[in-house]
Amino acid sequence: MKKANKFNILLIALSFFAISGNAHAASLLEIYQQALQSDPQIHEAEARRLAALEAKPQARGVLLPQIGFDGSWTDSSSSGTSIEPDGTTPFNSASESETTQWQFTLRQSLFRWDQVVNLKRADKTVAKAEAEREAAQQDLIVRVAQRYFDVLAAEDRLTSINADRRAIARRLEQAKQRFEVGLIAITDVQESQAAYDQSTADEIGAKRALATAREFLREITGEYVSKLDAPGDDFPLLSPEPSNESSWVDLSLSQNLTLVASRLDEQLARDEISFRRTGHYPSVELVASTGERDTKGEQSFNGSPFTNADSEGDSDSIGIQVNIPLFAGGGTSSRVREAVYLHRASREQLQRVTRATERESRDAYLGVLSEISRVKALEQAVASSRTALQASQAGYEVGTRTIVEVLNTQFSLYAAITNYYQSRYDYVLNSLRLKQAAGTLQIQDLELIDKWLRDRPTPEERLAEEDAAPATS
């Protein structure tokens, strides 16, 4: 029993420290730094970059002298009988030997065009890997921001639905009281009850959506984050600079990292054609070798005593080897045609990526401008919805409005608030995507956003505060 109590105390203590550790709201920059350390996708891109960097020393290595060493040790014995040419006299022989030999060989390419082409390709391979790694870093910034604001949007929706449900609960209680004294019909109570039941179901769905959004964020950061900073009321809405759509498109077509990598991929495919054509070209190599052979042995004929049969020798050689491919069964020509078709495919891919880059750049630019206007319009919509709700409530009190109209107006207010917050998140995301399309997105952009983020309570904290409010009043 005492052990159980100690175990419960330990759990309470651990829970307290866990809650205390999560009390601090994480900023967008902190989440990005966590993702930079934990996201498998960015680690995969870095590993692929490091692997691609090895293409350069590998291509350069085959142009340098190649030195090899061969050595062997052999112990052998043999015996046998043979017939002399006269056909009658047998001839017996036996031998034993131990042979040690070694040889150094040096090869130096004098002309191999495939190695020259491969060295040129290595530079482009490295450049492509660098572009892809930088593109992966920019993509991580956008993915982190997307999932960060998805969590905030899910919290907004849950908070809105929860506030709507509580307001409907109060309406339902009032309707029941007014029905009991005969001021309203039973239909008002039933409509309030139906709205409350629907809001309860919506709240369950909103909680599930919030849990899913937090899980998507954990997928990048490697750990759960229960509390996030959110844009404050003073969050600025800045127009893109330069304030010209064509300028952003031109910048994207010249600097977009995915497009840069696609261009390099097309050039590599073109170089592959040249590389495979070298299968028809001759190659010239300088070959030099030096070695030694030492044999210790004995031999016997027709039963005579074994006699010494030792031998030793040195060998040195130098020469030039020329290899001219004459016919390979059509395989080389087939590989060349394959490379031509692959280059054609890479050109079409480049065209597709170019068009997609232009579309993404235009869409992000227009998205920033439209979201600025939309944020302002929704801010006004929130104010108008509040006024409309007050008017509906007053009309309901004097009997000119029905409970359904009040509930609909109330729902419209909370929906307007949620849409207002969502439009601000969309503005930030479109701004980041615009810079990503232009290839200029950097961590400094997150630092700038971070300056305008503020701490705010989570839906769970707000609910706990509201539940505790009546007890403290």
Image (tube, rainbow, N blue to C red):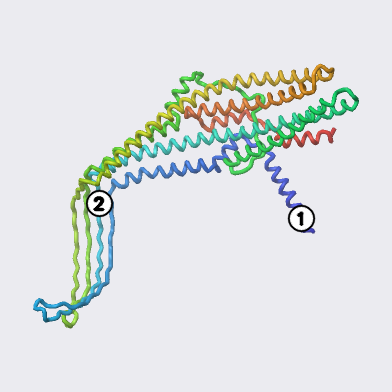
Residue at (21, 74) in percent of width and height: 297
Mark 1 element type: helix
Asked if residue 121 lies left or right of residue 155, the reply is left
The residue to which callout 2 is attached is 107
Mark 1 Cα-neighbour bin, 10 Å: few <14, some 14–19, many ≥20: few
| Numbered circle sitting on residue 31 | none
The residue to which callout 1 is attached is 6
In the rendered view of the protein, which quadrant contains the C terminus?
Answer: top right
Q: Is residue 165 visible?
A: yes
Three-letter code for the amino acid on which mark 1 is drawn: Lys
Toward which corner of the image does residue 453 lie, by quadrant?
A: top right
* Mark closer to the chain start, 2 or 1: 1
Q: Return the x and y of residue 23 as percentages of the image width and height.
A: 69, 39
| Placement of 18 over or under 300, stated as above or below | above
Asked if residue 207 lies left or right of residue 48, the reply is right
Task: Determine the CA span between mark 2 and mark 1.
Answer: 76 Å
In the rendered view of the protein, which quadrant contains the N terminus?
Answer: bottom right
Quick one: 401 or 36, which is closer to the camera? 401
Q: Return the x and y of residue 264 as percentages of the image width and height.
A: 38, 34
Quick one: 178 or 259, which is closer to the camera? 178
Asked if residue 158 lies left or right of residue 469, the reply is left
Q: Is residue 275 visible?
A: no
Three-letter code for the amino acid on which mark 2 is drawn: Arg
Residue at (22, 46) in percent of width and height: 327
